[in-house]
Amino acid sequence: METNHYHYITEQIEHYSSKLLREAIFFGSKNAIIEGIFMPGDRLTEDDIAQPFNCCRTPVREALRKLGQESLLQVKPGIGMIISNLDIELLQQELEIRKTLENYSLQKACEGITEEELKKLEWATDKLQQAINKNERIAANRANIEFHRLLYSYSRNTFLQKTTDSLWLSFRISFLSARNEDVIMVDKSWYEERNSEHLQVIHSIRDKEAEKAIKVNTIHIQKK
């Protein structure tokens, strides 16, 4: 396991220390996939996970089986388990659904967002810009995810939030596959353009201009 992978997993161990071991392994590994620590196509072995968790293979096997059930892992003959790769048709379906749900969230946000909630969106853009400036890819991914999850939460629709949690995970895998990002460097121009669009969305929400916010966000999603 690469050093940055090892450090990330050990960080997740501490974060999920209150959970059962198999659950901590599952959520820690799942987060590693969402945030691009484990990239689509990467080979993953039981030892890769068991070593930083300092545990036997049984809870690891249970966690990896669950990741497979969620289509995050697949078995490649002659290779073993790998992080699931891009499905172009699935990506297009995800984009359509995400556009519909996220634009719905924007419409609802324009109807009742608070100043405190707007500040949280602004903080997420600040975090993203700081990550870009420092060339920290993981922090950039986290800030980007935080911004969009905040938008979903401002829909005030609990069912939508649960749905988009699942959608976002699948979309992140497709996104990472399609972009094939360098595992260390941040694509600064791409992230800065996306963050500029985030700010345009915030300004439109603050002005209660739902149509403008939706127009900017639709373009934003299509550029993923």
Image: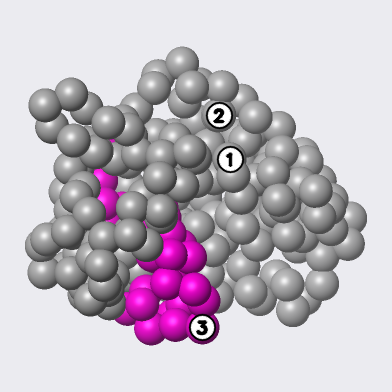
Question: Which class describes the residues within 10 Å of circle 3: few (<14), some (14-19), or many (20+)?
Answer: few
Q: Quadrant of the C terminus?
A: top left
Marks 2 and 1, how far apart at CA: 7 Å
User: Looking at the image, is 7 positioned above or below residue 28?
Assistant: below
Number of numbered discs overlaid on the protein picture: 3
**Magenta portion: prevailing SS class:** helix
Marks 2 and 3, how far apart at CA: 33 Å
**Contact, mark 2 vs mark 1 (Cβ under 8 Å):** yes
Which residue bears the numbered disc 1?
167
Q: How is the image coloured?
A: one colour
Residue 18 counted in the magenta span: yes
Which residue appears at 77% of the width and 76% of the height? 115
Which residue bears the numbered disc 2?
94
Name, please, the residue furthest toward the top: 89
Question: Which class describes the residues within 10 Å of circle 1: few (<14), some (14-19), or many (20+)?
Answer: some
What x and y, as percent, mark residue 20? 49, 73
Indicate the secondary structure of the residue bearing disc 1.
Answer: helix
Q: Which badge, 2 or 3, is on the more N-terminal residue?
A: 3
What x and y, as percent, mark residue 214? 70, 39
Which residue bears the numbered disc 3?
18
Q: Which residues are magenta?
A: 11-40
